[in-house]
Amino acid sequence: MPMPGEMARFAAQARAAILDGAAVPDGLGARDPGQVARRFAVYRNNVTVGLVDALATRFPVVHRLVGDAFFQGAARVFLARSPPRSPVMTFYGDAFPDFLGGFPPAAALPWLADVARLEAARTHAYHAADAGPLSPADLAAVAERDPERWGLALHPALRVVASAHPIVAIWAMNQPGATPGPLASRDAETALVARPGLDVRVVPAEPGEAEFLAACGRGASFADAVEAALATAAAFDPARALARILAHGLCAGVTLPETETEEPS
């Protein structure tokens, strides 16, 4: 029976052979010794195909946008540079958007990396901690207080993805059943990714909303968050922002100074 140290060495050799293209690990045999390398190559290819498929599953819009041949080629280059480091594959590919941003064959698609960032954010939102969204009743309980005292607690699933490109429109027109077509606008878009219940939703941020939510995330009061939003977008409408926060489940509750009791969410 192999000793633990021997098993660890074999595992390290096998991993290097599969993911890094190193030599076939010692200790493998076959009835025809000449078949060892060929059979291991088949196994290595199966692992590679599985990992590429995992990336295609996590980034279906990127896959659809570039086509199967391009995606397969890009994914294999990425795999060679960034093999998985954990047996848990849920978040494998977090580095894929940055890879695409510096991948020369994708240079003609400057929006591709940000679309990938949006898809990666959806995975994180889906697996984030559960929390009930802020309800109108909870908000009404503090809305008449001094806005310098209370603030908004972001929902743990909320993710914000800013881009110089219309990534929400690109993502939406490449969903199952949708038909891609000309973009109505090529303006920059910031995506708000939320999961108030079981389903992840993606909505484009309105002027100032991203700055408002970022200030809330830093612990700013409602009044200070409004001021931060107005400093970057004079068109920011606090009342409309609150309505959208409730509608899309972007916040999980309200916060109060430590001397007061926090409102339930």
Image: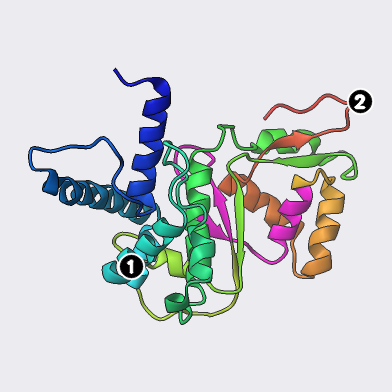
Residue 149 x %, y %: 89, 39
Going by the numbered disc 2, the residue's amino acid type is Thr
- Tell me the quarter of the image containing the N terminus: top left
Q: Earlier in the sequence, mark 2 or mark 1?
A: 1
> Which residue in the structure is indicated by mark 2?
259
Report x, y in % for residue 260: 88, 26
Task: Please indicate whether residue 146 sits to the left or right of residue 78 in the image.
Answer: right
Q: What residue span does the magenta drawing correspond to?
A: 191-216
Instruction: Answer above or below: position of 130 versus 215.
Output: above
Residue found at x 47% / y 77%:
104
Residue at 51% over, 62% down: 97
Q: Which amino acid type is shown beneath numbered disc 1?
A: Gly
Tell me: 177 left or right of 228: left
Q: Is residue 194 magenta?
A: yes
Q: In the picture provided, is 195 more to the left or to the right than 251? A: left
Foreground of the two, 163 or 108: 108
Q: How is the image coloured?
A: rainbow
- Relative placement, left or right, of 99 versus 53 is right
Q: Position of residue 175 (x, y in %)?
A: 36, 61
The image position of residue 187, as x and y in percent, is 58, 78
Residue 106 versus residue 226 in the image, above or below? below
Please name the residue shown 48% across and 67% down the image.
100
What label does residue 73 carry, if any? 1
Quarter of the picture holding the C terminus: top right
Q: Label 2, secondary structure: give it.
A: loop
